[in-house]
Amino acid sequence: MTTDTIKHGAHEDQAHQEGGNLWGGGREPFKASYGKLMMWYFLLSDAFTFSGFLISYGALRFSMPTWPLPDHVFETIPFYSGKAPLIFVTFMTFVLIISSVTMVRAVQEGHRENKKGVVFWMLLTILGGITFLSCQAWEWTTLLAKEHVSIHRNPFSRHMEAGVYLNEDGTPIVKDGAEETFKKGDSYLIHKHDGEWDLRKYRVTEGPDAGQVKQLAFGPKAFGALFFFITGFHGFHVFSGVLFLAIIAINAASGVYVARKNGYEMVEKIGLYWHFVDLVWVFVFLVFYLL
Amino acid sequence: MSAHLSYEESKKVVFKGLILLGVITLIEVFIALFGNGHVISGFHLPKIIMYPMMIGLSLYKAYFIVYEFMHMRYEVRGLALAVLLPMVLLIWAMIAFFNEGNAWFNYRDYVRTKNKTEVKTSIQPQGDKKPAETLEIQEIH
């Protein structure tokens, strides 16, 4: 400051003191470090990317006369052949919430400069991330290999009119002494037998088309494309998060951040990213599985 | 950050967060299953009741994650505004695109019939005027 006074004179120095040093450095904007602030801005832009995807899901769903019911599509769980609607994705949500909590603990231990604590809680977070990815792999495998949903074809849909399923000769199918009927809005899945789609025939019993014989139609194919693209994009975030967590955990264990003496700020930054992944899942869970 | 809360206090916040997020998720799933007739068979809740409840609970979860887990509560006001205010733009994005989706739905039948329409053009000379083109539109059923 003394050299400044000599150079610019008293008048300019006064202006300098009033606000000049805000631009001259020495004070952090928003009282956050550069890395943390930029992580926030990255997450903001990422939030817009995900919002764009989820809003396009909404627009396409609004444009379709029918849409598969989530608690019919997502009703499978491992090791149990019966129906368990939404149970598996609820478990996946819990895995992500718990890994978020262990991440908070890692950041807290970082503030105390407790190396062992940071590494321990980060390893648990990585475990949570890997568990989530494994669950997603199982979910995708079920949809792709067993139920044959792809980005080109979606065999899940809902009936748009009431009717009764027919045999090959045109008579109603009778099961357990009752005709196999369905109501408007009931869900169905077109099965694949020996590589052939089983497009069952039915007679419409209500509405303007009553009496007509029709075949089951595939559901909106946008459903499969949006599901695999959006959950895949989220899963890729989880995957890259696990990689970064692993790198930072190794760094922390080797003592890199002890020397920096900044309260394990790197752990805090990857923590922000990891919570964001959990945050996005809140909305992916809402639009794909709940609504 | 931790400067605002003691270590023991912030550990309690974490535990509270775990319980809170877990319970809200369970409530959401219960609403979805109850409303779609999986709890009491044949009993359905109207979507106009189900959807706002589930969206509201999800927004509360998002608020809690950002403000407690991501420590937005302890950042300066300017940082919070710089990150959160741009999200207001999404309200317009939702109104615009959902409205657009609805319009695609309403025009679906119209576009289908238009696609089946065959347009025939024929040229009829009229005196010394230039040959005028007339369109004959025929619907194919």
Image (tube, coloured by chain):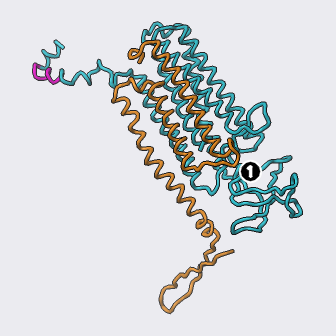
Chain colours: A cyan, B orange
Q: Residue at x 45, y 34 (%)?
A: A44
Q: Residue furthest bottom?
A: B127
Give residue A9's quadrant in the image.
top left
Confirm whether the magenta stretch covers residue A13.
yes
Can residue A61 be seen in the rendering of this structure?
yes
Magenta residues, start to end: A9-15
A124 shown above or below A76 = above
- For the question of whether residue A153 can be seen, the reply is no
- Using residue B122 as the reference point, say whether residue A17 is left or right of it: left
Residue at 69 percent of width and 74 percent of height: B141
Instruction: Give coordinates of residue B68: x percent, y percent.
Output: 46, 25
The number of numbered discs placed on residues in the rendered structure image is: 1
Query: Does A72 sit left or right of B130 as displayed?
Result: right
The quadrant holding residue A15 is top left
Look at mark 1 in the image and give the residue it sits on: A188
Q: Residue lying furthest right in this view?
A: A169
Q: Chain of mark 1?
A: A
Q: Position of residue A93 (x, y in %)?
A: 61, 31
Residue toward you, B25 or A170: B25
Where residue B56 sits: x, y (%)?
50, 40
Which quadrant, please, contains the N terminus of chain B?
Answer: top left
Is most of the magenta stretch helix, strand or loop?
Answer: helix
A204 lies left or right of A93: right
Hey, what amino acid is under mark 1?
Answer: Tyr
